[in-house]
């Protein structure tokens, strides 16, 4: 199976003519841009895509030219956790666009160290007080939902803990610790979208009847009963698969599927749970509207 076999089209949804569309663009890895009526929310945007030798041996630097090219506009940036493939470009894009960043305490530390203005960073972790934090951005209503990271590295979550001390930015790969993990529910124009940035979840915390689930694939095979739990918890109408690509390969090379993601088996299991679910994947920078 190739990801193109799962390509989404706007025909996956009944597009209303009475309002402007909600446009969902895949930025590679777990990254998405979601736009409606001129407001753009970025989630886990990662476009630098450092090479594997750099990730192993050198401090990681966000590529400003790539950030400018692939993330030209953002009103808000949401970071689900602070591994480098989710957060490396967040401070750069925030500074380029003036967007407000929503993320964990770990994300806040990083953004402040990288020079993002204090009033442009919202720590959704310390303001939660046991309840999901909410925010309004233009027509979007955001709700940050506590979640968990898949334990795919020999049964462990890679690089656990917080980014607490960033005096020595740029950081190396292992300094990008996971931090607190969040899913984000986005409600806009009567639709409910949900970004699951790692292949695990706290089943009782998530919303049901999601119109479009943006689902991270990486690590799904090591998460207990992942497919049945996801389908029963979210009861999604449609699922867009993400984080199945080789993120050490540059943007210009297009998305290359990693065989270890076992996409055919994943699709089979999701379809068995709900034969009517709309399943899709997008090419790099491809969009779907709903
Ligand atoms: Zn991660």
Image (cartoon, helix red, strand yellow):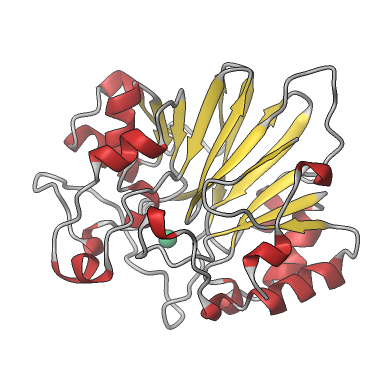
Residue 154 image offset from top left, x and y in percent: 43, 83
Residue 99 image offset from top left, x and y in percent: 39, 24
Residue 224 image offset from top left, x and y in percent: 64, 76
Observer-nearest of 128 and 66: 66
Image quadrant assignment for residue 220: bottom right
Image quadrant assignment for residue 69: top left
10 up-or-down from 84: above or below:
above
Q: Quadrant of the C terminus?
A: top right
Q: Is residue 89 left or right of residue 251?
A: left
Residue 228, visible in the rendered structure: yes
113 up-or-down from 256: above or below:
above
Q: Residue at x 78, y 42 (%)?
A: 211
172 up-or-down from 102: above or below:
below
Observer-nearest of 140 and 29: 29
Q: Residue at x 31, y 19 (%)?
A: 119
Q: Residue at x 25, y 22 (%)?
A: 117
Q: Which quarter of the rendered image does ligand 1 occupy?
A: bottom left
Residue 239 image offset from top left, x and y in percent: 73, 54
Q: As drawn, which residue projects farthest toward the bottom? A: 154
Observer-nearest of 103 and 74: 74
Q: As drawn, which residue projects farthest toward the right? A: 276
């Amino acid at each position: 199976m190739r990801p193109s076999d799962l390509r989404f089209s706007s025909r996956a949804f009944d597009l209303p003519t009475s309002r402007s569309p909600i446009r969902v663009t895949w930025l590679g890895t777990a990254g998405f841009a979601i736009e409606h009526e001129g407001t753009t929310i970025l989630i886990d945007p990662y476009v630098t895509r450092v090479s594997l030798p750099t990730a192993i041996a050198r401090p990681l630097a966000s590529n400003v030219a790539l950030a400018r090219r692939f993330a030209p506009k953002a009103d808000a940036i949401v970071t689900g956790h602070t591994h480098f493939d989710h957060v490396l470009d967040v401070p750069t894009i925030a500074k380029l666009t003036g967007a407000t960043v929503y993320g964990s305490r770990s994300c806040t530390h990083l953004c402040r160290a990288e020079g993002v203005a204090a009033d442009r960073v919202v720590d959704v972790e310390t303001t939660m007080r046991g309840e999901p934090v909410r925010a309004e951005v233009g027509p979007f209503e955001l709700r940050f939902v506590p979640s968990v990271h898949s334990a795919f590295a020999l049964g462990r979550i890679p690089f656990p803990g917080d980014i607490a001390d960033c005096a020595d930015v740029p950081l190396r790969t292992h300094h990008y610790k996971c931090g607190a993990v969040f899913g984000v529910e986005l409600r806009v124009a009567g639709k409910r979208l949900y970004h699951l940035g790692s292949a695990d979840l706290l089943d009782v915390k998530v919303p049901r009847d999601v119109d479009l689930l943006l689902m991270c694939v990486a690590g799904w095979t090591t998460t207990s009963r992942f497919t049945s739990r996801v389908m029963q918890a979210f009861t999604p109408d449609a699922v867009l698969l993400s984080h199945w690509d080789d993120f050490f390969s540059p943007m210009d090379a297009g998305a290359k599927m990693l065989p270890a993601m076992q996409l055919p088996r994943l699709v089979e299991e999701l379809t068995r749970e709900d034969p009517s679910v709309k399943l899709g994947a997008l090419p790099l920078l491809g969009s779907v509207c709903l």
